[in-house]
Amino acid sequence: MSARARTILFLMAAAGLAVVLTLGLIDLPPMGDYRGPYGYAVTQVAVYERHATDVVNAINYDYRAFDTLGEEFILFASVLGVLLLFRPPSKEHQEQRQSRKGDSDEEDLPASDGLRVSTQAIMGMMIVFGVYIATHGQLTPGGGFQGGVILASTPILVYLAGDVQAFEKITGSALVKVAECGGAAGYGVVGILALLTGAHFLTNFLPLGTTGDLFSSGTIAVISVVVGVEVTGGFVQLMQVYLREIVASELQKGK
């Protein structure tokens, strides 16, 4: 396809998208105006029915848990697609790794002592905070998606500190791949276990516990954790492949 044909095709698609967006925006309610009764009804019953003080997570991981399962697998498929797109041929990949091993710029990026010390201190806090957000989503604002992003950001600090070897070891670990696959599968396993108890798929079948306690809300807390594991593994792999491309591009420019 010629450049002119691609441009025409793009302009036609962009015009169609603009029309759809314009029609969607015309009838938007004013900021803060809520037209549907669903939110008010769930707000009134969620704490009583699910023992979860964070109604948003009760909706995401219980009332509409099947929809959230689809969203999680969209993320899973997106990460898989990026990994496939950036995956080089095996021979080329080996040659690149061998050339990078002899390149001092990639093995030890320049970083000040202050940056190294500060990143080490921040890493511990980020890990604790990420675990807290992922495991307390049923009680406070947060949940698996938010906690997973925080945990996945931790290896970036290792990279910023200049230790590329440690970054590669962390992001290239088999545990990262297991986390992404296991977290996604864990969500489905929760739904299957509900079927085995005689309930509907993803129905909350665990004891709800005491409202306000960490082990309250039944499967909501479990799903939040497995989502956090999947999001952590997925985003860590994305950071690895993108940073590898940046380093490879810089090495090519240097040559």
Image: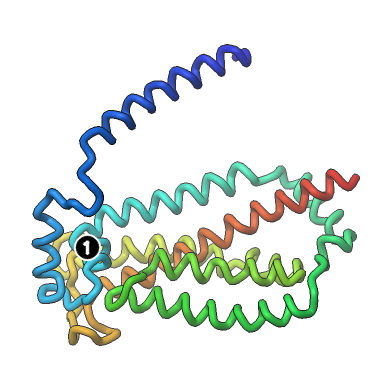
Q: Position of residue 21 (x, y in %)?
A: 33, 32
Q: Position of residue 174 (x, y in %)?
A: 59, 67
Residue 48 against residue 32 in the figure, above or below:
below
Label 1 CA crowd tier, 10 Å (few <14, some 14–19, many 20+):
some
**Which image quadrant is residue 119 in?**
bottom right
Which quarter of the rendering shows the C terminus?
top right
In this orientation, which residue lies closer to the viewer: 200 or 44? 44
Q: Is residue 236 above or below residue 154?
A: above
Image-based side of 91 in relation to 128, left or right: right
Q: Position of residue 100 (x, y in %)?
A: 83, 57
Instruction: In the rendered view, tell whether residue 151 sits above or below residue 7.
Output: below
- At x 45%, y 48%, the residue is 77
At label 1, which amino acid type do we have? Answer: Ile
Q: Residue 145 versus residue 209: which sits nearer the camera?
A: 145
Q: Looking at the figure, which quarter contains the N terminus?
A: top right
The answer to whether 135 appears left or right of 252 in the picture is: left
In what element is the residue under mark 1?
Answer: helix
Taking the image as shown, residue 58 lies to the left or right of residue 158, namely left
State whether residue 109 is above or below residue 69: below
Q: Which residue is mark 1?
A: 59
Classify residue 113 by image quadrant: bottom right
The residue that appears at 75% across and 66% down in the rendered structure is 164
Q: Residue at x 62, y 69 (%)?
A: 155
